[in-house]
Amino acid sequence: MKATRRPLTNAKVERIPASGIRRFFDLVSGVEGVISLGVGEPDFVTPERFREAAIRSIKEGRTKYTSNYGIQPLRQAISEHTARLRGVTYEPEGEILVTVGVSEAVDLALRATLNDGDEVIIADPSYVAYVPGIVLAGGVPVPVATVEEHDFRLRPEDVARAITPRTRAILLGFPNNPTGGVLTDDDLRGLARLADEHDLLVYADEIYDRLVYGGEHRSIITLPGMRERTVYLAGFSKSYAMTGWRVGYACAPAVVIEQMMKIHQYTVMCVPTAAQYAALEALRTGEDEVRRMVGEYDRRRKVMWRRFNEMGLQCFEPRGAFYCFPNITSTGMTDDEFAERLLVEEKVVTVPGNAFGERGRGHVRACYATSLEKIEEACDRIARFVRRV
């Protein structure tokens, strides 16, 4: 008797949808005249000094595996950078891990600390990889609604209502992708208090930490007792225009970093050597480049935010990252319909808000990490589309 054929794939993975961001990115590949406000990627070329550092490392023959933790000079520079920026010091030996982008750092943090059934509280909407990452690590995502009336903040009182005996951690992705929301000092203090009261871990994904407008970013690791219960995640992709280099890092107590390193060791071994030297140069000499790019993003932010509101699409003023998140319900369309018709009829790419969670429905995400000329033209097309529908 013939045996029943077993499925070829993992059921857990099958339940995870493909990224809504990449779907629209693939749709426009090769299409003439398209303006993409879809993928969150700086339009700036990686600064020359960083590129030259990578080339120099190759010419000097530094092309072998590095330590699983990353090259020692980069870990030392990350330690000094974090101390200077946050006033918190991590030991280069044992408390810092260089990763393949912050995406790997998030994945490693979840897999190294979650047990099956552990609940993780996240903001809704939030970055598309959080829910799949939690699920693949065996955890249970618990979305907590954030709303425009409260600046898309993850408020402590809302988090408190979501905590159960199974809650293991809070994942903070702020400044927020896709909303541009930031947390206040009171939010951070309240969340830190909840973490202490309920003995929770905090994953702090701060990839957009330098992209804040009209204020300064404050990390939860700066609050008393939070260094010991936080996995701090940051990197180079957004602030340093180094998306394709794939360099991020995690800072945490040594017991956590050691477990993260073991997974990293058995999957990717180490971050590409030349990319690590480029990142090292970015930390050593890149501050002027960061300030220049942030100033330009701020100009673009103001234009896009103003244009959306002028065309009747209510839009919260983003205070971090490089996205606007306009409400499109006034058009009578769903966010999927709006994004698809806008692409077909006007060749402008946005991302439906539902890609980022249920509370993203009725919005689209538009990235202003592109030139002012393209932003103005895209907004002209969107305004024409809105008038027509």
Image (cartoon, rainbow, N blue to C red):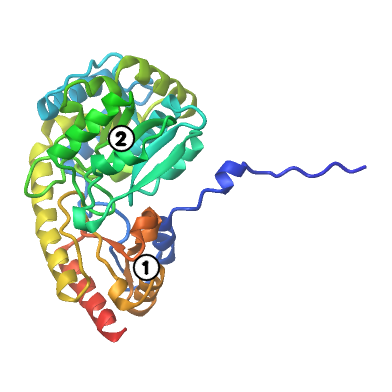
Among the two numbered marks 1 and 2 on one chain, the one whose residue lies closer to the N terminus = 2
Toward the viewer: 134 or 91? 134
Callout 2 secondary element: loop
Residue ID for mark 1: 335
Give the residue drawn at x 34%, y 77%: 332
Relative to residue 254, is residue 279 depicted above or below?
A: below
Q: Where is residue 328 drawn, in percent x and y? A: 29, 70
Callout 1 secondary element: helix
User: Seen in the image, is 252 located left or right of residue 190?
Assistant: right
Question: Callout 2, which amino acid?
Answer: Val
User: Seen in the image, is 260 located left or right of residue 278?
Assistant: right
Q: Which mark is residue 274?
A: none
Q: For residue 246, say whether it is visible.
A: no
Q: For residue 313, say whether it is visible.
A: yes
Q: Where is residue 186 drawn, in percent x and y? A: 14, 38
Residue ID for mark 2: 247
Residue 218 position by quadrant: top left
Residue 297 position by quadrant: bottom left
Q: CA distance from mark 1 to mark 2?
A: 33 Å
